[in-house]
C-alpha cells in the first residue's frame, strides 16, 4: 500500500478481508447519511439532521485515521472505541466544527443550537453523554481540538464543510422548542434530541449496511402498508362474528363496534376499559389499524408489560395475519440481544429499527429506549413518529417511573403525531394532580384529555360478570402450601397463580405428587425460566387438554384432569378458561387479571369461582408488597364484589397516594432543560438519566439461548445457534433466536459459565448459549435450572 494517499479520496469504511469491493468513499457516505437523516428526522429537526449526517464522520478525513483504517481494514475498523489510540477516534471533529460554523453563520443563537448537534455527532458511536463533566470537558480537550484541526486541514470538498443545507436552518425554531421545554415540561428537549440522534444513527447504520451488504439493503422496500393488515383482520373478525353466539360474544361485538367508531376521532390519548375476556386484544388492534389509516399513521406499536407473555400476543396477531407472511409483524423484546458495550459491526447492523408496520414489544424495550443513550437502543425512535402506540395492561406501568413515562407519552402525542391507547381491564389513574397533603407524591403532570372508547363502562362490566371472588376470612393467617395443594388436588380443572417462581415450582411439585397415583392426571407449570417457545408449547398443550376434556365429557367418556400452576405471566395475553382459579394475595389489578382466566367464555351455568388465599411466603419488598398492602387496606371490610369498578379505582388512587415517589430515580430533574443563551449551553444529563431509567431493578442480567426442542417441530435450534456462532448476528436470525432466550442474573450466568454449562458466543459478545449435550441444564417442565429470573416482578 502506498504511504502517500493524499490524492486518493478518503475512506469511510474499508472492504472486508478477501472482498473485491472498492472502499467506501467518505464523501459519498457523508452525503448519503445527511440526506437519509433529513428524511428520517422530525420536520423541525430536518436541516439539523442533514448537517449531523454531513459532519458526523468528519474526523475520518485525518491522515492518521486514514492510515489506520487502510492498515487495519475489516468491518470493525471504523467503530470508535474499539481501540484506545487517539489517532483512531473521529467523532469530536464534526461536533467542534458544528459549533464553529453555526456560530459564524448565526451568532450566539447558532452556537446554542449547535449544542444539539454536538450531543448527536460526538455520541454517534459511544452514545449520548452528560454535558457537564462528560461532553463539555471532552470537546474542550486538546485531543478533540487536534482531531478537528487535522480534519479541517485535510483535503476535501468545501461543500461538505459549508453546505447549502445550513441556509435552510432557522435557529429560532429550534430555540423555541428548547425554551418551551423549560421549566414546565422536563424531558421534552431531551426527547427532541433523541429523535435527532435516532435519525442520524439509523441513517449511518443503513448506509453502512448498504456498503457491506448491498443485497440485504436492497431487500428493504420501506414499511409495508397497513391496508393488507386491516383487510386480514376484518376478514378474521367477520368469521368470528358469524360463528359467535351468547351474551359474552354479544358484549365483545359491542366493544369492537365502539372501537371502530372511536377510531375515526382525531389523534390523541384514548382509553379502552374492558373486563378481561372482553375481546380487547383484537378490538384494540382494530382500533389501531382503523385509526392509523384514517389519520395517516405509519405503524402500530403494541407494548406489553412482560417478556413472558409477549409471544402470546404476537402469535395471536400472526394467526390473524398468517397469509401476509412473518415480516409484517416484528416481535422485539431483546431476549437475544448482546452486550451493547461490546458491540461489533454485525451486531450494530442487526439491532432493531422497527421497520415493520406492526411491532409487538415490551414496556421495557419501549420506555427504556425512549430514555436511552446507546445507538442500538435509540436507532428505532424516529420510527415512533406518526404511530399508534397501544399500551396493553396499562395498569402495570411501574409507579417508580410513572411521572417520566406519562411525560414522554404526552410529548409523543403533542410533538410527534402519536396516538396512545391505554388498554386494560383495570385502568390506572393517570390524570391525577399532585397529592394535596404531600405535593412531592402523586403525578405532577397528567396525560391531559383522554377519550374513553366504551360509552358505558359499568354496563359492560355487568354484562361480562362471570365469576365470584372469595376472599380469605382475614388477611393475616397464611395457608401452608400443603393445604393449597390439597385443595387444588380436589378440583379436576383448576388454575393456581402465585407470586414467586420458587412458589410455583414448590406448589407444582406438591400437586403433581398428589396426582401421580391417579389415572388421567395432568399438571402443568409456567414461569419466566421457560423460554418463549417452551411457554407457547405448554400453553397450547393446556388449551388442547381443556378442549379434549370438554369433548370427552360431552360424549360421556372419562376425562383427564387439567391442573396448572403458574406465576403471573398467565394473567395477561393468555386466553385460558378454567372453572376454578386460585390466586395468592396480590394487588387488586393482578387478582382481576387472574379472574379473567375463570369462566372466560361464560360457558358455566353458574359463576366461576376465584379463591384468594394468603400464601405462606411474603411478597417481595417494594412495589409488590405495596400493592398487596393497598389491596388489604381497600378490602379491609371484605366487600361482596371486591373487583367492582369503585373498589379498583380506590385501589389505584391509594397506590398512587402511598407510593414513595412517581419519579424515584429523579429522571425529570436530570432531563430538565436549562438552555442558556448567555452561557451558550444546553446542559442535559442524558447518560445519567439513561443509566437511572431501568424498569428492571437489577440491570446486571444476561441472556442464555437454550436448546429447547419443540414437540411440534419448528426451528432447528442447534442449526440456528451454529449459524450465529459461525457468521454472527443478522436481524432475521436474532428475531428467530429470541424465542429461545432466557434472561437470568449475570452472577448466575457466571456460575453456569464456570461450571461449563454455558459458553459465550464469540460473534455476539454478552450473549450465552447452553452447551450442546448439556441436557440437564434445561428441565422439560420447569425450564432453566437457576435460582431466579430477573424482570419477573414476582421474583423471590
Image (cartoon, rainbow, N blue to C red):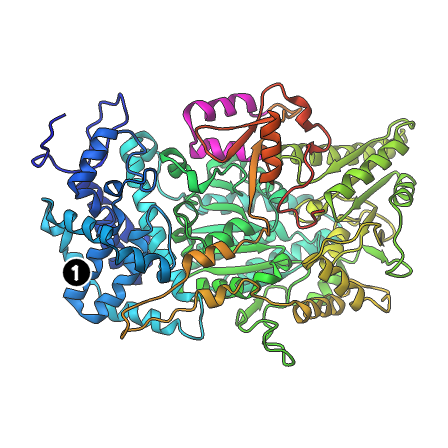
Asked whether, in this view, residue 191 is left or right of residue 244, the answer is left
Which residue is disc 1 drawn over? 101
Please report the residue visible at 50 percent of the width from the left and 41 percent of the height from the top. 329
Which quarter of the rendered picture does the N terminus lie within?
Answer: top left
- Magenta residue span: 714-739
The verdict on residue 592 being magenta is no
Residue 157, above or below 657: above
The verdict on residue 715 being magenta is yes
Please report the residue visible at 62 percent of the width from the left and 37 percent of the height from the top. 748
Q: Is residue 351 visible?
A: no
**x%, y% of residue 478?**
88, 53
| Local secondary structure at mark 1 | helix
Q: Residue furthest top?
A: 773
Asked whether, in this view, residue 573 is left or right of residue 9, the answer is right
Q: Is residue 392 visible?
A: yes
Asked whether, in this view, residue 637 is left or right of residue 273, the answer is right
Please report the residue visible at 58 percent of the width from the left and 60 percent of the height from the top. 422
**x%, y% of residue 506?**
81, 39
**x%, y% of residue 735?**
49, 35
Q: Quadrant of residue 716?
A: top right
Amino acid at each position: 500500500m502506498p504511504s502517500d494517499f493524499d490524492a486518493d479520496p478518503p475512506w469511510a469504511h474499508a472492504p472486508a478481508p478477501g472482498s473485491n469491493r472498492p472502499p467506501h468513499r467518505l464523501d459519498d457516505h457523508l452525503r448519503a447519511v445527511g440526506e437519509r437523516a433529513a428524511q428520517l428526522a422530525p420536520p423541525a429537526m430536518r436541516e439539523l439532521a442533514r448537517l449531523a449526517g454531513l459532519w458526523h464522520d468528519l474526523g475520518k478525513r485525518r491522515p492518521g485515521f486514514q492510515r489506520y483504517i487502510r492498515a487495519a481494514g475489516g468491518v470493525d475498523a471504523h467503530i470508535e472505541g474499539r481501540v484506545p489510540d487517539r489517532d483512531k477516534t473521529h467523532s469530536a471533529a464534526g461536533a467542534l466544527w458544528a459549533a464553529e460554523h453555526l456560530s459564524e453563520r448565526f451568532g450566539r443563537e447558532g452556537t446554542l443550537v449547535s449544542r444539539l448537534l454536538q450531543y448527536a455527532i460526538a455520541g454517534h458511536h459511544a452514545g449520548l453523554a452528560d454535558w457537564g463533566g462528560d461532553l463539555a470537558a471532552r470537546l474542550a480537550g486538546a485531543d478533540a481540538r487536534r482531531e478537528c484541526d487535522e480534519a479541517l486541514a485535510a483535503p476535501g470538498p468545501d461543500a461538505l464543510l459549508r453546505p447549502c443545507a445550513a441556509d435552510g436552518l432557522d435557529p429560532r425554531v429550534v430555540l423555541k422548542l428548547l425554551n418551551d421545554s423549560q421549566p414546565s415540561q422536563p424531558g421534552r428537549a431531551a426527547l427532541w434530541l433523541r429523535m435527532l440522534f435516532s435519525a442520524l444513527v439509523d441513517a449511518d447504520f443503513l448506509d453502512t449496511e448498504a456498503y457491506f451488504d448491498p443485497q440485504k439493503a436492497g431487500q428493504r422496500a420501506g414499511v409495508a402498508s397497513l391496508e393488507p393488515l386491516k383487510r386480514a383482520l376484518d376478514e378474521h373478525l367477520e368469521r368470528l362474528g358469524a360463528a359467535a353466539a351468547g351474551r359474552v360474544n354479544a358484549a365483545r361485538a359491542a366493544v369492537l363496534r365502539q372501537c371502530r367508531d372511536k377510531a375515526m376521532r382525531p389523534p390523541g390519548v384514548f382509553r379502552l376499559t374492558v373486563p378481561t375476556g372482553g375481546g380487547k386484544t383484537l378490538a384494540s388492534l382494530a382500533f389501531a389499524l382503523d385509526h392509523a389509516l384514517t389519520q395517516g399513521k405509519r405503524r402500530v406499536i403494541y407494548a406489553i408489560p412482560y417478556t413472558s407473555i409477549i409471544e402470546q400476543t404476537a402469535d395471536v396477531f400472526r394467526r390473524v395475519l398468517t397469509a401476509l407472511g412473518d415480516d409484517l409483524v416484528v416481535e422485539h423484546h431483546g431476549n437475544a440481544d448482546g452486550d451493547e458495550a461490546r458491540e461489533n459491526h454485525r451486531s450494530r447492523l442487526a439491532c432493531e429499527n422497527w421497520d415493520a408496520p406492526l411491532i409487538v414489544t415490551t414496556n421495557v424495550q419501549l420506555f427504556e429506549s425512549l430514555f436511552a443513550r446507546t445507538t442500538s437502543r435509540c436507532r428505532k425512535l424516529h420510527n415512533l413518529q406518526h404511530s399508534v402506540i397501544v399500551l396493553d395492561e396499562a395498569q402495570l406501568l411501574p409507579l417508580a417511573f410513572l411521572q417520566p413515562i406519562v411525560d414522554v407519552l404526552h410529548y409523543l402525542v403533542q410533538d410527534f403525531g402519536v396516538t396512545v391507547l391505554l388498554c386494560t381491564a383495570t385502568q390506572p389513574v393517570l390524570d391525577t394532580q399532585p397529592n394535596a397533603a404531600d405535593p412531592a407524591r402523586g403525578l405532577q403532570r397528567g396525560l391531559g384529555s383522554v377519550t374513553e372508547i366504551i360509552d358505558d363502562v359499568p354496563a359492560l362490566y355487568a354484562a361480562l360478570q362471570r365469576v365470584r371472588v372469595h376472599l380469605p376470612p382475614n388477611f393475616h393467617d397464611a395457608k401452608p402450601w400443603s393445604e393449597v395443594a390439597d385443595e387444588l388436588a380436589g378440583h379436576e380443572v383448576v388454575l393456581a397463580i402465585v407470586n414467586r417462581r420458587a412458589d410455583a415450582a414448590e406448589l407444582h411439585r406438591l400437586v403433581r405428587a398428589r396426582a401421580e397415583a391417579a389415572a388421567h392426571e395432568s399438571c402443568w407449570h409456567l414461569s419466566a425460566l421457560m423460554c418463549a417457545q417452551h411457554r407457547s408449547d405448554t400453553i397450547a398443550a393446556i388449551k388442547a387438554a381443556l378442549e379434549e376434556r370438554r369433548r370427552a365429557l360431552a360424549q360421556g367418556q372419562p376425562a383427564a384432569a387439567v391442573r396448572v400452576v403458574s406465576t403471573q405471566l398467565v394473567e395477561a395475553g393468555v386466553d385460558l378458561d378454567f372453572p376454578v382459579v386460585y390466586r395468592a394475595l396480590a394487588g387488586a389489578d393482578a387478582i382481576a387479571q387472574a379472574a379473567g382466566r375463570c369462566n372466560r367464555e361464560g360457558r358455566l351455568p353458574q359463576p366461576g369461582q376465584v379463591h384468594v388465599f394468603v400464601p405462606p411466603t411474603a411478597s417481595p419488598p417494594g412495589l409488590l408488597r405495596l400493592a398487596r398492602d393497598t389491596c388489604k387496606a381497600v378490602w379491609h371490610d371484605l366487600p361482596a364484589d371486591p373487583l367492582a369498578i369503585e373498589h379498583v379505582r380506590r385501589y389505584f388512587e391509594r397506590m398512587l397516594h402511598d407510593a414513595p415517589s412517581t419519579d424515584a430515580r429523579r429522571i425529570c430533574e436530570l432531563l430538565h432543560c436549562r438552555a442558556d443563551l448567555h452561557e451558550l449551553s444546553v446542559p442535559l444529563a442524558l447518560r445519567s438519566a439513561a443509566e437511572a431509567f431501568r424498569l428492571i431493578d437489577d440491570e446486571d442480567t444476561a441472556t442464555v439461548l437454550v436448546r429447547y426442542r419443540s414437540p411440534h417441530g419448528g426451528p432447528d435450534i442447534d442449526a440456528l445457534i451454529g449459524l450465529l456462532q459461525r457468521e454472527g448476528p443478522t436481524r432475521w436470525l436474532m428475531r428467530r433466536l429470541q424465542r429461545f432466550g432466557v434472561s437470568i442474573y449475570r452472577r448466575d450466568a457466571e456460575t453456569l459459565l464456570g461450571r461449563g454449562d454455558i459458553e459465550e458466543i464469540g460473534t455476539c459478545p454478552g450473549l450465552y448459549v447452553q452447551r450442546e449435550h448439556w441436557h440437564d441444564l434445561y428441565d422439560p417442565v420447569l425450564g432453566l435450572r437457576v435460582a431466579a429470573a430477573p424482570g419477573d416482578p414476582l421474583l423471590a
